[in-house]
Image (cartoon, helix red, strand yellow):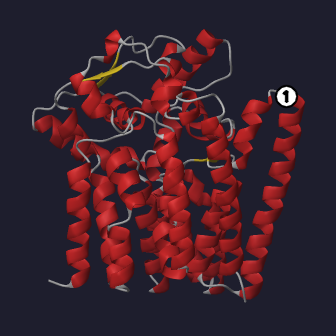
Amino acid sequence: MEKALKLALVALAIRLLVAPFLGHLWDVKTLQETAFYTIKGYNVYELVYTLSRKVSEASGQPIFYEGYAYPPHLIIIILPFYILYLALGGDPQPIKVSEAIAGVSLLYELQFYLSKDVFLFLAIIKMPMILADSAIVYLLGRRSERLAAIYALSPYSIFITAAWGMFDSIVALALILSILFFERGRYVLSGIAYGLSLVKIYSLVALPVFLLHARNRGFEALKSFIAGLALSQAPTLAFLALNPEAFMYSVVVFHLFRQPSGLTPLRMLNVAENTTLTMAASTIHTLVSLAVYILILATMYRRNVDLKVGVAATLLYFQAFSKVVHEQYYLSVYPILLELRPREARVLEYIVIAYGLVSVGLFLAAPTLLFLVDFRILELHASIVYGDIGYITTSLVGPLIATLLSIVAFTVTLKTIMNLLKP
């Protein structure tokens, strides 16, 4: 058995050992509800839209229900695994919330409790992400066994995929495959693979890179790539046609108007409590970030940088300048950056995992804890459950640590982009 395959199997085994016992319950519950209601014939975008309106009306604030907010490809991917889970006799909704639609308490005073099937559910619903991780290890191993071993044993990739249960490994795999197909002249397949990466729409920042490189290879290459991309978006167009307002609100408006959060210095605007200052800072940030993006694209075009370098640079740009930068986003570019700049890739990995450990709170321990203790008898403020350690100690310690980490991450990311684009 070749070494790359052995490393992929090692990665698979490690993640399967972790998957049943840990999980970000809100995010995994979102996958559960998405699969559950899709099986029943509901349009999940309509459900999320309705819940967002209820939460806004109950709170009197223009806030969103944080449900399924992605293009529909992930629904298609997870449904067979959810059906397998049901075939094995699993509880259709093993993660439960008392008083499920209880106004703002749904967001700020969560009370989760679980059925005994939660361990089986966590293992099966994470399988697409785990298999994507294993495929990444295999593809890396075909080029470098050392890099494949790093990714297979990476605490960060294990944390996001197997422990957390997020699906950014699918984005990473789709981008890697798109680059590989493009390099081999399989432009339709490259377009299809890139379209799959849009299961998280932040990968849109890489689209101009693919289009520029396709144009450089001739009109036929460009036409074929666009045809593949268009074909990949058939599910998106179908759901958009079903209910344009619900789809756009859940997938586009939600992301455009989210408050700054995560691994970004902009998170400090949330504590400023000054509307004028916040609007001014947001406007300046938008203008600067657009200027930087145009500069990056112009530099790539002028220097004719490699496709892989361009994809990595634009995804890192998103990590640096987006107003919402959650720790899982970095996984989409991590294996690509490992090949290009392994030292910087590892440095960013350590920064992001440090932030992740600060921010996750009780969620990663919750499946075991909640199975032993019925949290319906407890009152837990969601800031503790969600994880910002500042609310567990004082109101400033956690946000301060997270802000410092975000400044370091911004600086390192910007320096890495500059190194990638050096002539």
> Taking 35 as reference, is 198 above or below it?
below
Residue 85: where, in percent of width, then height? 17, 39
Which residue position holds label 1?
Answer: 275
Disc 1 marks a residue whose amino acid type is Thr
Q: Which residue is drawn at 44% across and 79% down?
A: 180
Q: Residue at x 44, y 86 (%)?
A: 184
Say if residue 401 shows up in the picture. yes
Closest to the observer, 334 or 234:
334
Residue positioned 81% across, 50% down in the render? 286
* Side of 224 relative to 206 (left or right): left
Q: Is residue 283 left or right of residue 249?
A: right
Residue farthest to the front, as pictured: 393
Q: Position of residue 144 (x, y in %)?
A: 37, 85
Q: In which quarter of the image is the N terminus?
A: bottom left
Q: Which of 182 and 396 is in front in this view?
A: 396
Task: Judge whether 295 appears above or below 160 on screen.
Answer: below
